[in-house]
Image (tube, rainbow, N blue to C red):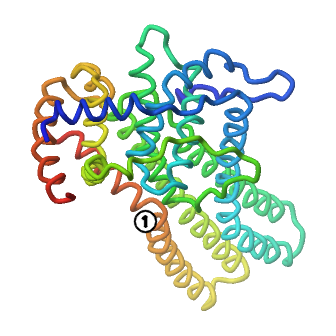
Amino acid sequence: MDDVPPDPVWHPAQGFKFEEPFLALLNAHLGLIHRIARTYATQSMDRQDLFQEMVYQLWRSYPSYRRESSPITWLYRVALNTALTAARRRARRPRLVPLAGTPEPAAPPPPADDPEAASLHRAIGRLEEIERALLMCYLDDLSYARIGEILGISESNVGVRLTRIKAKLRGLVGETE
Amino acid sequence: MDLEQLKGRWRREAGGEMPVPLDAGTVSQWIDARAKGVNREVRRRLQREMATYIPMLLALSVMMLMQGLSMPRVLVVAGLNLSVGAIVATLWYSERRLTRLPLDRSMHQVLEELLVRVDAASRAYEVAYVGFFAAAMVLVGVTTWRAGAGVWFVAVIIAGALVVLWARLSGRAYVDRMFGRYRAELTDSLRQLDRV
């Protein structure tokens, strides 16, 4: 049997079943979702598309959200997995056309006015996508154990990979400056 | 730049972000639009597949029934229609499995599971495509044989074999076009994760 959790269904009469706790969780970590969308999608349209896809996938995964597991680990897993799989799925289908009247996410603008930050973001954008995920988790101050849990690799592997990323990033920042 | 410096900079930037909180109306509107979008995508894909099978199904059904109505012929035509129904159901299930992958697991587990599902969907598309053409050719062969096992029958057998061979090659090419790049990218991500 398929172990796919059932889709929570929006019902006009019953409303949004998980409205309050889900919305609170979403708003508490909105910055994180924006950062992941910005790291994985460079164009504004793609960013908005990815952001909405992440919100949708978080909502779909919400019934399987286990209270005992850390909300951060859960959120990172769903958002990063969406970023990785959504971009690929887009290649299999025509781009989604924004629906008239659908509000756009109020994403903070990328740091275009700060050359050093812009160069840093460009360098991060040139890392392999798994390296980007690992670096983001590290920059957000997650422990090696938690990063390993999110990515599904060992703690020691996380350490080794971060050392390599550090060296690679130094070179990339130099190139993009 | 040192990683600790980078972390400091990243955190300052993150701290400076003040995203506008989302309200329930906006979120439910997005979710509604996305859910409909996913279903529409699956429906369109199946409609495209049907455009391949329906004309052939109609041609075969008409060809069979033009020879006169009899219980075996009606049963064969019904069976052929049912087989197309089974193909649609299989493809629908494969597509649903791709779009409903649980994403709350580790990245490694998700990528592995997605690869398994992509492979299963590829196989389903290919088997449905080749199987349908093979079944249709067998049906044409049986019909011709019942009319008399002569030169026409031999010609139909040869043509049938060629059609099945063509279906195999074009089916593989079609599946490669549809899933090839997707699969290669997933494999690459998994390789990146496994690299120590």
Q: Residue at x 29, y 42 (%)?
A: A132
Residue A85 drawn at (x, y percent): 44, 45
Residue nearest the viewer, comparing B164 with B155: B164
Q: Point out the image quarter for the N terminus of chain A.
A: top right
User: For the point 56% across and 43% down, which residue is it?
Assistant: B99
Q: Quadrant of residue B26?
A: top right
| Image-based side of B34 in relation to B1, left or right | right
- Relative to residue A147, is residue B124 depicted above or below? below
Above or below, B180 relative to B9: below
Of the pair B11 and A47, the residue shown nearer to us: B11
The tally of labels here is 1
How far across and how far down the image is residue A3, in percent?
52, 27
Secondary element at tag 1: helix
Taking A78 as reference, is B180 above or below it? below
* Most distant residue in the top direction: A68
Please tell me which residue is depicted at 49% across the width and 41% down the height of the picture: A108
Looking at the image, which residue sits at the far front?
Answer: A113
Chain containing the residue with disc 1: B
Which residue does the image show at 21% across and 22% down from the upper left?
A144
Identify the residue under disc 1: B176
Mark 1 is on which residue type?
Asp
Task: Give coordinates of residue B22: x percent, y percent.
Answer: 63, 30
Is residue B178 rendered to the left or right of residue B181?
A: right
Where is residue B106? Give x, y as percent: 36, 29
> Would you say A35 lies left or right of B88 here?
left
